Amino acid sequence: MPEKTIESFSVHWLQVLDEYGTCDEELRPLLDDANIKKLFEWMILARTFDNKAFKLQREGRLGTYASILGQEAAQVGSAFALKPSDWMFPAFREPGASFVRGLPLRMILQYWAGDQRGSLIPEGINDFPITIPVATQVPIGVGAAMAAKLKGEPIAVMVYMGDGATSKGDFHEGLNFAGVFSAPVVFLCQNNQWAISVPLKRQTAAKTLAQKAIAYGFPGLQVDGNDVFAVYRATNEALTRAREGKGPTLIECVTYRLGDHTTADDASRYRNREEVEQWKKKDPIERLRMYMEKTGLWNKTYDQEVRSQAKDKVEEAVRETENMSPPDPRDMFHFMFHELTAELREQMEGFLEGNGRQT
Amino acid sequence: MATLTMVEAINLALRQEMEKDPRVLLLGEDVGKNGGVFRVTQDLFDIFGEERVIDTPLSESAIVGAAIGMAIYGLRPVAEIQFEGFAYAAMEQLVNHAGRIRTRSRGRYHCPIVVRLPYGGGIRAPEHHSDSNEAYFVHTPGIKVVVPSTPYEAKGLLIAAIRDPDPVIFMEPKKVYRSLREEVPDEEYLIPLGQSRIVMEGTDITLITWGAMLQPTLQAAALMEKRGINPEIIDLRTLSPLDMQTVIESVEKTHKAVVVHEAPASCGVGAEVIARINEKALVHLEAPVARVTGFDTVMPLPKLEKYYLPNAERVAEAVDRVLNF
């Protein structure tokens, strides 16, 4: 009996806007001028915020912070495709996406400054708080998507993760569940090439991360993650598929972490400057700017206006954060259960009578 | 009123809660058509269909993770982990998310899940199928841990667990699943979480236990009564939160206590119970509180498990040691 091919697969690559700002008009998503400007403005805001957060950390005004420098298109382009009724489950390097969702800038600062109130997602925003344990948000997002499907609500769930997450069991268990139950979920992997000091080739021997979806029975595609049009187009299509009951999608955004892993890291210990310089040439904001200049959507006055507004918003967020009253230590106890248990009450009262008596 | 096994009582509780509340659903390995490997979910697939009795992939972390996601989305999932020895794969979800999401989101989200976990030895099960691992969960902030000891208890506690707004690990003693029958009301009833019960009143010594160890403790009490000793037996029912008031009141009366559990001794829940007795009632004690527990060994395979598991004789010996101190 001859061997035969019983199944074959392909992984597609999508780029709409190249690094010189040249756009493939046939692939350009249906975005009007106002929305293209919004993408630009959100990316400027994300970068302005990121620069400020980094500086605050260096000045000792913020704890650890995970920079998003270079990943603005992957975050803004994807979150821009979400509807308010959709749900979003971030990892810990997605403030750009969270802002598009409506999360006040102040909350990200507050969280990284060590105040748990920064992860109180305001009512009306269907987002999960930042998730630090890598990939653990994946099965949870899938569960939310399964619940939406069971309730007959036509929404989609987006779960963010990085390249490192694709090595974790929860990534595989979560994607497998999503495939089996045809859950309305989009997995948005920001492949920024580095998981702290470990390069992509130490995470996987596979040529792409996108192809991991194939094993779970749903499509995976790779997009230029520094191309905001490609990210938006791919995400929008995947979210639409999900909302229409056509199941999950994995989108691998190929991007690059221009900064250190976090402010506690020094990337010069493990990667060379030339690599970073090469990626700087693929800057996601600059290429959209060039496109907008060519199409008359950008000029210097507009640019200055956008940057100055972003700076004002960020400065305002810093002021708000630094003017917050300190958190109430009783909150440690009060939010453990719906009702304070007898043992927690006893511990809290002991604390309040002891070194907590100033509170 | 019907006379039911614990398996039947749990099945009845699940069915009644699912009939009452459309948000309640079951998920786990083999819980659907097969009715669960212990038949706890028998017939529920036929009654409620595949959307509410969900056979999942073999995937403990995703079973618990998906249950958390469903709970955040407004459902009331009851997840089954087939055996306690497979729960370790789901620990990260329990510790990092189930027990934390209320506090992390400052109350915006909460996690009303129940994770059913058949546990313990004495049924000649294969390796990794007989652990008594409640201490890991009790040590985890934000999670409640319930261990029923009889069919009646199982039904009332499970209904309370399903209606509880916080995550509950519901540990079902496999040894008791079918070895004990008792009258279980058809109608619904709740046994509030966080309240222990006095199973037998006595004056001479307090025996504190839970789950599968209640039966050998009762047998030990029968041996003692023949010798004129009247023990008081307390079934803790809920290990987190732990109701110490009943225990303290009893120890103030008897001045002596023994804790009996199946799990290894070191850092077992018995150690916590004794620490709290010492904190609250040390001056009432006439002897150090004794422990009768499993050993700090790996749970042995069936040919040796009878030596590992505490039995009536070991409990009676410990009582003698305390009484003769």
Image (cartoon, coloured by chain):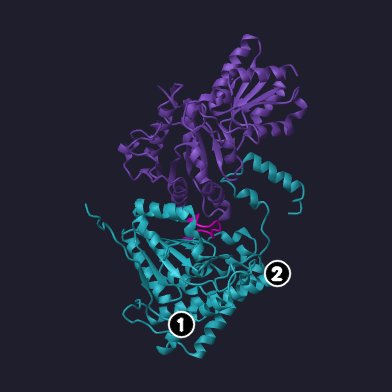
Identify the chain drawn in purple.
B
**Residue A33 in the image: above or below residue A182:** below
The residue at which mark 1 appears reads as A287
Helix, strand or loop at disc 1? Answer: helix
The residue at which mark 2 appears reads as A60
Residue A313 shows in the view: no
Which percent across, then down, holds residue A137? 49, 56
Q: Which residues are magenta?
A: A126-137
Which percent across, then down, holds residue A172? 43, 54
Identify the chain drawn in cyan.
A
Disc 2 versus disc 1: distance between alpha carbons? Answer: 34 Å
> What chain is tagged by disc 2?
A
Q: Which residue is drawn at the image coordinates 37% and 83% (left, top)?
A: A23
> What chain is tagged by disc 1?
A
Taking the magenta stretch, the answer to whether it contains residue B100 is no
The amino acid on which the numbered mark 2 sits, given as a three-letter code, is Gly
Q: What is the total number of numbered labels drawn onto the structure image? A: 2
Which percent across, then down, holds residue A32? 37, 80
- Other-residue count near label 1 (Cα within 10 Å), few / some / many at <14 / 14–19 / ≥20: many
Q: Nearer the viewer, residue A25 or A321?
A: A25
Helix, strand or loop at disc 2? Answer: loop
**Residue B243 in the image: above or below residue A226:** above
